[in-house]
Amino acid sequence: MEKRNTDPSKRPSKFGDLYHANVSSSEFKYNKGIRIFGETEPADYIYQVVEGAVRSHKLLSDGRRQIGAFHLPGDIFGLENGDFHRFTAEAIADTTLRLVKRESLERVAKSDPATVRALLTMTTDNLQHVENHMLLLGRKTSQERVAAFLLEMNGRMKEPGCMALPMSRRDIADYLGLTIETVSRALSEFKRKGYLKFLGSTQRQIVVLKPSGLAEIDS
Amino acid sequence: MEKRNTDPSKRPSKFGDLYHANVSSSEFKYNKGIRIFGETEPADYIYQVVEGAVRSHKLLSDGRRQIGAFHLPGDIFGLENGDFHRFTAEAIADTTLRLVKRESLERVAKSDPATVRALLTMTTDNLQHVENHMLLLGRKTSQERVAAFLLEMNGRMKEPGCMALPMSRRDIADYLGLTIETVSRALSEFKRKGYLKFLGSTQRQIVVLKPSGLAEIDS
DNA sequence: CGATGACTTGAACGCCATCAATCGCTGTGG
DNA sequence: CCACAGCGATTGATGGCGTTCAAGTCATCG
């Protein structure tokens, strides 16, 4: 199950400088809806999405949920400095993940500044995303939030313009601090304005026709 | 103006492992309301609050403001991995700051894993705070937000129970994603319930009488 | 004193949430 | 093959929480 992968030519782009070190990794599959790790559980591994999609969230005691991030192919998540995870991570779709033992990474990091630097860079990228999301959650209107979401996803897709969203309206709502109805209404409004259209029978295939229109709404 | 400070016995607690290295620091004073650095400005220094208080915020084009954090004595802020600041920082009260040239820190960090590790730890602490704040902004009610704010500040004061808040109601509102009126109403409600009281003529001296009451509201 | 600014309090409004009905697609079983 | 249950999503009607607008209080400062 476990295999070495130190060949730079084979390494995926986003794992970045971690691969120059001698760390072992293995791949696992998770079915849609399966939990990868839970909040406050020990952080023994860090993860990279090979295929599929993952959501990370926090819960309040009464079930209110805030999704902090969606993780798409190439993304790394579950990286902690402390001993425990601070989010629950679940597979949104059938997903393949690459796992790296945290211990093996820490061992390398002890003596190699470049590896610690790589960890710092990943943490900073993370931080930057969350900081921007804080502004969205604290101060943006519902339309601005949905527009921002579409632009974010559009930018993260391989081919911008057409995107097959892996997440449900509920996931989007919990990411944006809204309800599914409000998300749905915003999407319908954008469609009415000609900023986007749906593809196929399902409503998760979205084509952005006028990014500039969305960008204008996102202020 | 600039002076060496490598004596461990003199170093303030929170600067942590940065001080074991040979980095120079200097102190400056900022009057109330003065900007320390602006969003997108080059990040040439990192800062530690010696005395006073600082707020960090982002702005939308139309003036809506989201405060990401308050920095109190001992706190470090303005630490960036990239070349530019991602927040604007302003002195809330008359404030004394210790400045460390980022360049000198980076030089040390190149060869010293412990220093990079210290930077990583600070960034992670930052991240954790912002992640929790995201849950607050996305999913908590106004009363929960204000209760959480009071508990946070109470925990950060030297003597818990009585606190002299350096920030205005507007600052609190922009930190919590609310309006000043809503913050004021929540505080009045908590006072009515006997969870807190005001001290003196000003309304910024708050005594928390029943933290458990606030904790219960914060769910 | 009058002016100013920070804060509180009251009244009315509006955005988003809530409640509810419907649609469309999928899968399942008679 | 069709009836129907179930789920996700949309759409409509209503309601409520927090905002907006406005007035009033209190402390500070000229």
Image (cartoon, coloured by chain):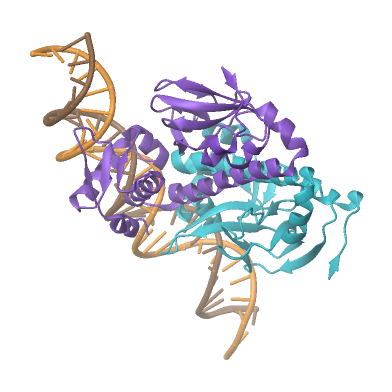
Chain colours: A cyan, B purple, C orange, D brown
Seen from the viewer's position, the closer of residues A8 and B155 is B155
Residue A25 appears in the rendering: yes
State the image coordinates of residue A178 (x, y, percent, origin top left).
Answer: 46, 51
Q: Quadrant of the N terminus of chain A?
A: bottom right
Q: Residue at x 36, y 50 (%)?
A: B151
Total marks drawn? 0
Q: Residue at x 31, y 59 (%)?
A: B212
- Rendered image quadrant of residue B6: top right
Give the side of residue A66 with respect to residue D19, left or right. Answer: right
Residue A100 against residue B169 in the figure, above or below: below
State the image coordinates of residue B181 (x, y, percent, origin top left).
Answer: 28, 38
Q: Residue at x 87, y 58 (%)?
A: A5
Q: Residue at x 64, y 41 (%)?
A: B119
Seen from the viewer's position, the closer of residues A198 and B44 is B44
Give the side of residue A124 with respect to residue A1, left or right. Answer: left
Residue B61 appears in the rendering: no
State the image coordinates of residue B35 (x, y, percent, origin top left).
Answer: 48, 22
State the image coordinates of residue A153 (x, y, percent, origin top left).
Answer: 64, 45
Give the side of residue A180 with respect to residue A102, left or right. Answer: left
Seen from the viewer's position, the closer of residues A3 and D10 is A3
